[in-house]
Amino acid sequence: MTSRTHPVAPARPAPRGMTLVELLVVIIVFGVVVSAALSFMTQQNAAFTDGSNRLGALRNLRYAVGALETDLTTAGTNVARGQPAVVYAGDDVFAFTSDYTSNTPGDVSAVYVDPSAPSGLVAAPTTSITIPNAGWAWPDTTYYQSGINSPAELVVFWFAPDTATGRSDDYRLYRQVNNGSPELVARSLLKDGTKPFFQYNRKTFDNTGASFLTPIPDSLIPLRHSVKIHSSAADTGRYAVIDSIKTVRINVASYNLREADVGGAAEATLNRLVDLPNTGFGVLLTCGDEPILGTSITAVFEAQPDGEPAIRLNWSAATDEASGEGDVIRYVLWRSVNGAAWGDPMLSIPAGESLYTYLDTAVQGGTSVRYALAVQDCTPSLSSRTQSATVVVPVTP
């Protein structure tokens, strides 16, 4: 029997391992990839955190400004006769009266009805209350409506430094009704640069009857309603500037609460102009004697930067504004061109300043212009007029 032999398979080479150089290259490449991934994730996390901080700051601002806007627009709602709508206007505190809350079911005059509201917080205060940040007490009289105490309570908003953080530039916003406990509205608030928290505008009118807003100068702030009875003969002139407030501008910034002790810059800022639809002057039937002007008006040619002609008018406060009856409401101006009759007034300017100036740009070269000035009280009646010298307007090239 013949035996067969099978071919022997060739031996497989032993598996080859990685050299040290190859291992080092792999480790380096892996390290570069991991480092890049970690760097990308760190950047994404920082961006997410930054966006979250900004969103949180903006939400905080919107809540604070929204609370202010909701309440400030009710100023002057259902106040009693003689009760002022705006009590105090400062750069960091604003106090007003409003029939904000009633605890009488079905009360249609109040802004809100809350049957559980304490009786001491749903009517005008009958004892003086020191207004925060003002160091001034109000009221000094009692206001009645139909023989009972006025339903319009005192509402105060103010900004106070936040001493609970490591920063020295942050504030809290508080709200208080009458002499109730202060309520914390928002914190982590900053000033918007050098702007005050509150700024004010008054409504003025031109000779056509059109109205426009005029900023109240910082030099007049704070304003307080120091006359007991609103719209009385004494509540005119410089005392009534506070009664002419028609809008409040809110300027505030915020940072994220998690950075309270870091001292970082503001994450967001917000500026809001709030209209006060229920504030303004009252109408009186009498205001005393005819107002005394007791001042003169000067008119001087003044070329504008663009070369167009203009005339600068200047005068000081009337006798009955700076002293006397103190019942001055506005100043009335007339303009006469080339000796024409005075006709209708060209402009009226609200009282409330110690010095007045107006730049008349509606003049033409080659004409002769003169002006007349009178003062008006709350009757309203006009004083006698005083006239300026005639100004010859040169012809511009």
Image (cartoon, rainbow, N blue to C red):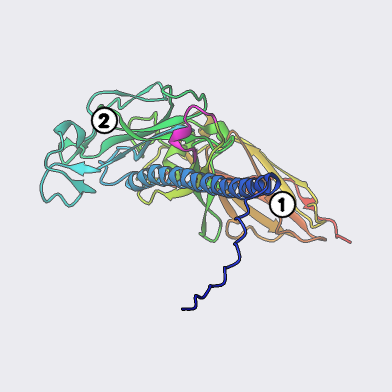
The secondary element bearing badge 2 is classed as: loop
Residue 178 - label? 2
Residue kind at label 2, given as amino acid type: Asn
Place of residue 355 in the rendered image (x, y in percent of width and height, measured from the top left): 62, 35
Residue segment shown in magenta: 253-263
**With respect to residue 392, does 191 lie above or below?**
above
Q: Quadrant of residue 159?
A: top left
In this view, the residue in front, 180 or 236, is 180
The answer to which quarter of the image holds residue 343 is bottom right
Residue ranking furthest to the front: 1
Q: Which mark is residue 370?
A: 1
- Give the crowd class for mark 1: few <14, some 14-19, many >=20 residues within 10 Å: many
Farthest residue, direction right: 397
| Whole-percent x, y for residue 119 in the image | 14, 33
**Could you tell whether 311 is left or right of 7 in the image?**
right
- Label at residue 41: none
The residue lying at 41 percent from left, 31 percent from top is: 172
* Residue drawn 55% across the image and 55% down it: 206
